[in-house]
Image: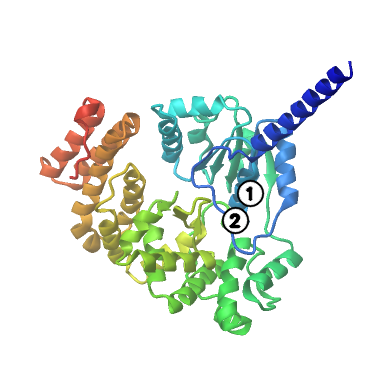
């Protein structure tokens, strides 16, 4: 009898230990994270109150909208939530509506499936999954891609997204937090600066490096002097914000001249992010490019995802850099660099980059646009072919029709490039057998 009791006790202990180990392994097991979730920035201020509100909102429903003007830190609060989640997370850079389908399609591809619908279905099949739509501006464009079961977290400046679910309003730091954050970033007290920057975390982070280099008095004396750009919804910030961005870029470039070249390339490529390997082509030395990227990240002019492979630029930073390029009439030369960087790109990412380059190209004066029409249309045709090569036929057909229309609008009737665009659309409409698909450079 005693032996049976001992054996029973041993079995119970083993079962308990096994359960504890399995629970520990389950908690330690890395959950799938898809998409460029930003990593934690330098001197990050943890906003536990907002994270608690997101948790509370999800306990009551499946959707949560972080609403606030540009630069208040919505993306980084969402990223902190995503990094700490115990369930699968899909991060979608949703400022470009077309990127939502691409993100689902990439998720499907990673699971051995095909098509954005399959990616959405896979995510809906995972318990507790979360999809983060970062920065969308059109609720109608997002509606068809909302999951049926997965939770949805949206960061936006557009109040219309309140229709999706409960809203968590976001503002900048409170004055005391802002002052402490700026001091941590700059190493100096600068009491008047946080108020002038609207207590925006992004602007304060960029100001920190400038003040550290030149002191707060010189910083205050030189601001504001930037051109005030046309405002978009949710961007009613002070002109100091744009000028702080440019001052931060000048400060970084004074130490590393390649930093401004890299920043300008990032500003004209896809807003959703650029793979480090693509930025390396700004060369000639990848090590020097990495050093420049590190300087931009330290100055909060760019940021990496948690894997360190995708670099993004906040849209306020992007707008300031583009505004400077327009004012200095240098946008055309930066687009030429972008053509060189993208010349050897052979992934479906080219579609996003070519679309961004096309938008910037259309802002050029005609005297600068003319010589660059051929290269930019070539990029657009290649985008269609690469989407076909990745079996993204729905996207390829939609883009192919758009690209052909652009050729018809910009080129004389019967132009040979228009014929090539028509062939690209035909390949998207009548895709070849898998064995015959190849990546074509046109």
Secondary element under disc 2, as helix, strand or loop, is: loop
Query: For this rendering, which residue is in front, 265 or 278?
Result: 278
| Residue plotted at (56% across, 57% down) | 235
| Residue plotted at (30% across, 34% down) | 396
Q: Is residue 431 visible?
A: no
- Label 2 with label 1: CB-CB less than 8 Å: yes
Q: Assign the N terminus to one quadrant of the image.
A: top right
Q: Give the quadrant of residue 433.
A: top left
Secondary element under disc 1, as helix, strand or loop, is: helix
Q: Mark 2 or mark 1: which comes first in sequence?
A: 2
| Residue plotted at (62% across, 81% down) | 216
Q: Tag 2: Cα neighbours inside 10 Å, few (<14), some, or many (≥20)?
A: some
**Label 2 vs label 1: CA separation?**
7 Å
Q: Which residue is mark 2?
A: 40
Apparent side of residue 79 relative to residue 395 in the rendered image (left or right) = right
On the image, the x and y values in percent for residue 197 come to: 63, 68
Q: Number of callouts in the render? A: 2
On the image, the x and y values in percent for residue 297 come to: 51, 64
Question: Compared to 198, does 145 lie above or below?
Answer: above
Q: Which residue is mark 1?
A: 80
On the image, the x and y values in percent for residue 152 come to: 60, 35
Residue with the most extreme top position: 1
Residue with the most extreme right position: 2
Apparent side of residue 323 relative to residue 61 in the rendered image (left or right) = left
Q: Is residue 169 visible?
A: yes
Q: Assign the C terminus to one quadrant of the image.
A: top left
On the image, the x and y values in percent for residue 45 come to: 68, 59
Query: For this rendering, which residue is in front, 381 or 363?
Result: 381
Chosen colour scheme? rainbow
């Amino acid at each position: 009898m005693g032996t049976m009791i001992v054996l029973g006790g041993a079995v119970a202990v083993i079962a308990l230990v096994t359960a504890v180990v399995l629970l520990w392994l389950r908690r330690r097991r890395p959950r799938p994270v898809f998409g460029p979730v930003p990593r934690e920035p330098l001197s990050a201020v943890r906003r536990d109150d907002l994270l608690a509100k997101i948790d509370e909102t999800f306990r009551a429903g499946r959707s949560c909208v972080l609403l606030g003007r540009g630069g208040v830190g919505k993306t980084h609060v969402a990223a902190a939530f995503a990094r700490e989640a115990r369930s699968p997370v899909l991060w979608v850079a949703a400022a470009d509506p077309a990127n939502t389908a691409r993100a689902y399609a990439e998720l499907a591809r990673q699971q051995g499936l095909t098509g954005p619908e399959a990616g959405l279905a896979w995510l809906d099949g995972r318990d507790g999954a979360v999809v983060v739509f970062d920065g969308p501006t059109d609720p109608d464009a997002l509606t068809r891609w909302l999951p049926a079961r997965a939770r949805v977290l949206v960061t936006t400046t557009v109040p219309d997204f309140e229709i999706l679910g409960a809203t968590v309003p976001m503002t900048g730091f409170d004055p005391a937090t802002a002052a402490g954050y700026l001091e941590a970033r700059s190493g100096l007290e600068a009491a008047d600066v946080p108020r002038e920057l609207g207590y925006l975390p992004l602007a304060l982070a960029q100001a920190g490096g400038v003040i550290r280099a030149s002191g707060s008095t010189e910083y205050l004396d030189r601001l504001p002097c930037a051109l005030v750009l046309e405002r978009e919804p949710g961007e009613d910030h002070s002109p100091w914000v744009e000028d702080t961005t440019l001052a931060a870029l000048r400060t970084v470039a004074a130490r590393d001249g390649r930093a401004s070249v890299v920043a300008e390339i990032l500003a004209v490529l896809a807003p959703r992010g650029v793979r480090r390997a693509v930025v390396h082509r700004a060369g000639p030395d990848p090590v020097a490019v990495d050093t420049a990227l590190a300087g931009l990240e330290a100055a909060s002019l760019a940021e990496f995802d948690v894997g360190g492979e995708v670099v993004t630029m906040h849209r306020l930073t992007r707008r300031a850099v583009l505004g400077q390029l327009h004012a200095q009439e240098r946008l055309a030369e930066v687009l030429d660099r972008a053509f060189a960087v993208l010349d050897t790109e052979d992934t479906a990412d080219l579609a996003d980059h070519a679309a961004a380059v096309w938008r910037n190209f259309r802002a050029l004066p005609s005297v600068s646009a003319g010589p660059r029409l051929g290269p930019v249309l070539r990029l657009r045709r290649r985008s269609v072919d690469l989407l076909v090569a990745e079996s993204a036929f729905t996207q390829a057909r939609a883009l192919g029709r758009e690209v052909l229309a652009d050729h018809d609008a910009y080129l004389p009737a019967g132009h040979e490039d228009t014929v090539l665009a028509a062939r690209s659309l035909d390949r998207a409409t009548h895709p070849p057998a898998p064995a015959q698909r190849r990546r074509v450079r046109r």
